[in-house]
Image: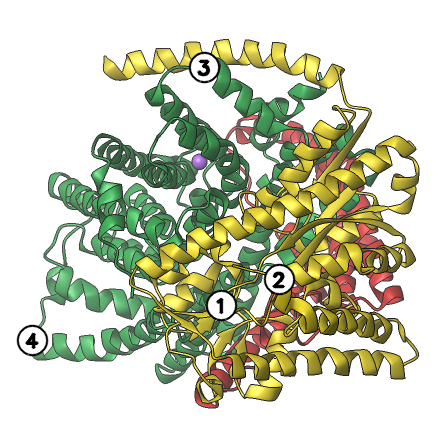
Amino acid sequence: LEMKFMGEKIVSSLKKAFIAAAICLLPISGQAAEVTWRVPTSVPEGSPFYVNFLQRFAKNVDVMTEGRVAIEPYGAGVIVPALQVYDAVVDGTVEAGHSSPTYLLNKDPINGIFAGFPGGMGPEAFISWIYEGGGEKRLKELREGEGFHSMIVGIGSTEILAHSNVPIRSKDDLKGLKYRTSGPWAEVMRDYFEAVPTVVPAGETYTLLQRKGVDAVEWAPPSANLSEGFHQVAKYIVVPGVHQPSFLWEVVTTKETWDKLPDDLKAKLEAAAKLTTYEGLTNFYAADIKAMAEYRSGANEIITLSPEFVTELADAGRKWAQKKADEQKASGKPTMSEILADYLAFRDAWNKERSYLITE
Amino acid sequence: MQSIFRAVDRLSLLAAYLAQAILVLLVLAMMYEVLARYLFNAPTIWAFDVSYMLTGVMFILGTSWTTKEDGHVRIDFLVQRLPARLSALLNGLIYFLLLTPLLAALSWSAWRKALRAIATGEVESVSVWAPPMWPFFLALAIGLTLLALQVAVEGLRSLHNAKSD
Amino acid sequence: MKALIPALMFPALFLLIFAGIPVSFSLMLVSVAAGWFIFGDVLFQQLFGAVHSVASNFILASIPLFVLMGSILERSGVASRLFQAMQIWLGRLPGGLALATIAMGAIFAAASGIVGAVEIVIGLMAIPTMRAFKYNNALISGTICAGGSLGTIIPPTVIAVVYAALAQLSIGELFAAVILPGAIMVLLFGAYVVLRCVIWPEDGPPISSELDKPLGEKLWITFTALFPAMILITAVLGSMLSGIASPTEAAAVGVTGALLLALCYREMSWKVLRECLSSTINISAMILLIVVGGTMFTGIFAAGKGSQLILSLVESIGGGNFEIIAFFLFIVFILGFILDWISIILICVPIFTPVIRAAGIDPIWFAAMVLVTIQTSYLTPPMAPSIFYLRSIAPKDITYKEMYWGVIPFIALQFVTLFIVALVPATATWLPKLLVGF
Ligand code: NA
Ligand code: NA
């Protein structure tokens, strides 16, 4: 009887629901925004990068354009493969895409400067270089050359250097360390520190760390790592994240799509992007602090590397960047070394004078 | 007509043999990786990319012969109650008129992707190894094209059966 | 009208599938018909993305290798020796082979998270043996499908990983949450098999007297059959459990081991090997093409605002937590008729999570129920991935009807499990609280 009652209830609810859905969906399709962009990203829905960057952007755009532009965010792999976001924009499959220059690194190492690289600037200095030191302009020029219009949507805080099954305190501890990492840091670890960078498919990272198939993993900032649960299977948490002091995401459209927009909307979209980037960063800071406190209060041991070791690691990272820039220059593409010089000059100036700044 | 059909069958069989060879390669590559990592503590930089590329290419190349063998799972207990001619007609029409153009268009996109990967020298986006992507995309394009051809052939065969039964 | 496209995709799909069109092709046809209204002339580029996604998915790479391993073990006779040896020891138990199959499914599921792989490996090995011992076809089918479906629920499972990522839950806690429900299910399955074979002994006949051999002979048979096969299975499972190898690599280890074993038994020839390779390619092409179709379907459903459709259904239902949970699970169950688990998770979890959190429902408990429900719909006819997999490896004379009748009791047991988890949330929430980690 109970089951039958439940069944009837579900059926009658469903009937009501379908009618309601038909009624409430029809007007939605009627009163569309002036401009609608489908925007896929490279991370799953629910990820802090999705919520904090893309979803926040959609909300800010809605407010600033008073509903004239609708951003429809899609998580990774739903309508476009996770790492095909830039290509999907070129193909015209979607109007815009949200991704990180990290994924263009193999295509052109110049993207490493914007993606954030080992030994690069931390978030405070980086965002200052981006908006006040010409970084944003450089990125826009780079993308324009590729047929895109780029808006920075998201700058992130510093990542955790490693969740590790073994303590990491010095260069010796890195020797032979099976370390899940990728990109420039994988090269730096292999070439300068004799570590063994290991490729692990995304869904297997937790299981392999738990089963000690890898000794250590690096992933994302503290707050984003919390739900991955690495701290529940590996005792040591190693900071600071000199491998990824900061990182950047962008929303790209084709130049044609962008040029079609009325000028007032262009300005509003740019403003929404910048607001999102600032809000996103401070949101990360606050969430990271809470996450670090949670790690510290648990069974984990947090290892803060000595300043000397951090400098050694950072120097190797910058050596990597300089090497790439020099290679580019030698092959007749001087842009990367120009931008890197710009970037490093800003970093030096910042370092020389940052003693006036209270960061606590 | 029959000779064209048989030529398509043979191409599909050839692709299936290729897929089998790739399967053997996949086993060897993975074994090498396990040994390299655990005996010499030196994982390769290529195993990850090689394994997904080989798998992807292998299964796409296998789809056309599987179609020829009617190996794609169908729920046919309802259709079996229809007269054989009618169900053959239904199957033939859907295969030839709907599925063939669909797969042809999909192959077209695959070829575009492959040609662009060749033109731009596209490389794997996240791997340290950074291999060129065009052989992978080219293989996908070839596999999908063969699938489209085989589906067309099977559709026409179905229609032929519907007429002659 | 455009807003109803996602809702119309389902009846259209059922129509094509029951018209006897292969499942993978049906998914593609519906995706194209619906997608045309959404993407227009860039539709096929969007759909090629689905091919690309599946063709470049590292996790899926383990499926062909596990299929190959199972296929070598089957055709070289290694599997039947193994099960014969098991029969010696389990023979007096009613339905002993079916019990062994379920145990094998559970063990395999504990090592890897690849759903279809578990079913195909145990299926390839167990079906010929159970048939040789005159087991009932329906019981065989149900046992293989249900034993194979355990890969969904017993951790580690890729489904839980993807779920956790989308819902921002701890992977470890979610793994811990499904351990007890998984164990309950295994016990229920085992109890059912024994009960059925006690009541109807002809369904899973006990050992024939000729196998009642002297102990020395029994030990010899066990040593030559069970022991080497156990080493192989231990190597595969062990390399995964110890983190030495990813599932794909472990599967390659398994293939190599199976090949060596078959060579030792002198049962491997070029012909057998060629047959194994050929059937592996066919099975893999069949399975992965369905995943391609499912990925296309999901993309179009999402781009057609299918999520909003579901959300407005939820809102219009209103009601308390019971209605919300029942309705969400109902949707998961329905979607599971057609879509593979990854599609269900991608569509549902982002819609459900905020509602569940806002209603103050324990997200871990809810997730455990969703995972049990996904597993149930994986088994539920007429559209059941488990049955598609089974069809691809089963002899032709096992009919759909037998398969359907075979899985129904197991589906009922999964519903029992679901009710237990629903009524006693501690089954899901107790272990995660105990979880200490390293
Ligand atoms: Na599992
Ligand atoms: Na089902």
Q: Chain of mark 3?
A: C
Q: Position of residue A225 (x, y in %)?
A: 47, 57
Q: Position of residue C319 (x, y in %)?
A: 39, 15
Name the colour assigned to chain C in the rendering: green
Nearest the viewer among A142 and C180 is A142
The numbered disc on residue C189 is none
Evaluate whether label 3 is on the same chain as label 1: yes
Q: Is residue C155 visible?
A: yes
Disc 2: which residue: A357
* Tag 2 secondary structure: loop
Q: Among all residues in the image, which is located at the extreme left?
A: C214
Q: Amino acid at mark 3?
A: Ile
Marks 3 and 1 sit apart, C-alpha to C-alpha, by 44 Å
Camera-side mark, 4 or 3: 3
Whether ligand 1 has any atom under 8 Å from the Cβ at mark 1 is answered as: no
Evaluate whether label 4 is on the same chain as label 3: yes
Nearest the viewer among A61 and B95 is A61
* Tag 1 secondary structure: helix
Q: Residues within 10 Å of mark 4 (few under 14, many from 20)?
A: few
Chain coloured red: B
Q: Amino acid at mark 1?
A: Thr
Marks 3 and 2 sit apart, C-alpha to C-alpha, by 55 Å
Marks 1 and 2 sit apart, C-alpha to C-alpha, by 51 Å
Count of numbered circles on the image:
4
Nearest the viewer among B105 and A242 is A242
Evaluate whether label 4 is on the same chain as label 2: no
Disc 4: which residue: C215
